Image (cartoon, grey):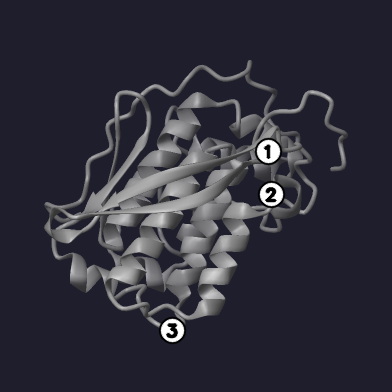
Amino acid sequence: MSSNTPVYAPQPLPQGPTPVPLPSKQDARLLVHFLDPGVGTGIKVNNKPRQQLSQIRSLSFDELLKTPEYVQHMFPITGWGPVDREFLLHVRTRNEILQDMRGSVQSFMSLLGFIVEFSEENEILIGFAGESRDRYSRWLKDADQCHLWISRMFASLRLFGLHDDAIKLYFAFLVTNTHFGNTLAQKILDHWEKIVSSSLALLSSNVLDFLPSFYDKQFYKVQLEGGSDATTAGTNTNTDATNTGATNTA
């Protein structure tokens, strides 16, 4: 990591529901143990040495490009590997895993030109990392694998219950794209918007079937270079509210 890479300092999230049991499938349990900072089980992909999550977060951007499977493990989504209803219901109630997910966001966003921190009120704060212009070039282009990684981060955060984090990160990318001349293709922007605005049931292919509890327009502020602010309005569909009467469609 460079000197500009943020160091993750865990902040306690509001206490969630009582943790549900570990998933029954062995591969899902292994993924939980990989994401759990108290266990830290390493993963082995493509005959490379076993890596813990903390080690993966210290890799350079070029190293991640060579082994994209690491990003898949950092930001799990439905339709990939062991991510099923049991897995998601478990991690959504594991405060320490959610805290550490924010650590993955910090490391990943630093590689793309952003500094991510969290306030005492657990709100996500987004600024600019050093050498930002060079790092922006990693994703400010028409088409790139990095766009898929960003999409995956948005989706994973929402599936894990960190909806507000996903929304604010999304607007940070939008504002930065506008600031540097609208480089991104519209199909990429449309895809990102769909991920952050669609229902949780649709996003998870009905693995999670929670219903939205309310619709609320919020304003997200992202500070641009030079100290100027850009405020973007967006409709925040709170589709992550727990519905105790949800039907199990898994």
Quick one: quadrant of the C terminus? top right
Q: Would you name the residue on which mark 2 appears?
A: 82
Mark 2: secondary structure:
loop
State the residue in front, 63 or 169: 169
Say which label, 1 or 2, has the lower sequence index: 2
Measure the C-alpha gap from mark 3 to mark 2: 31 Å
Q: Would you name the residue on which mark 1 appears?
A: 87
Measure the C-alpha gap from mark 1 to mark 2: 8 Å
Measure the C-alpha gap from mark 1 to mark 3: 34 Å
Mark 1: secondary structure:
helix
Q: Is residue 74 left or right of residue 24?
A: left
Percent position (x, y) of residue 95? 50, 25
Q: Is residue 9 left or right of residue 219?
A: left
Q: Would you name the residue on which mark 3 appears?
A: 142
Quick one: quadrant of the N terminus? bottom left
Percent position (x, y) of residue 20? 68, 22
Q: Residue at x 33, y 29 (%)?
A: 10
Q: State the mark number for residue 43.
A: none
Say which label, 1 or 3, has the lower sequence index: 1
The type of residue carrying mark 1 is: Phe
Say which label, 3 or 2, has the lower sequence index: 2
The type of residue carrying mark 3 is: Asp
Question: Crowding at label 3, few (<14), some or many (≥20) Cα neighbours within 10 Å?
Answer: few
The type of residue carrying mark 2 is: Pro
Mark 3: secondary structure:
loop
Q: Is residue 185 left or right of residue 180?
A: right
Q: Residue at x 69, y 53 (%)?
A: 203
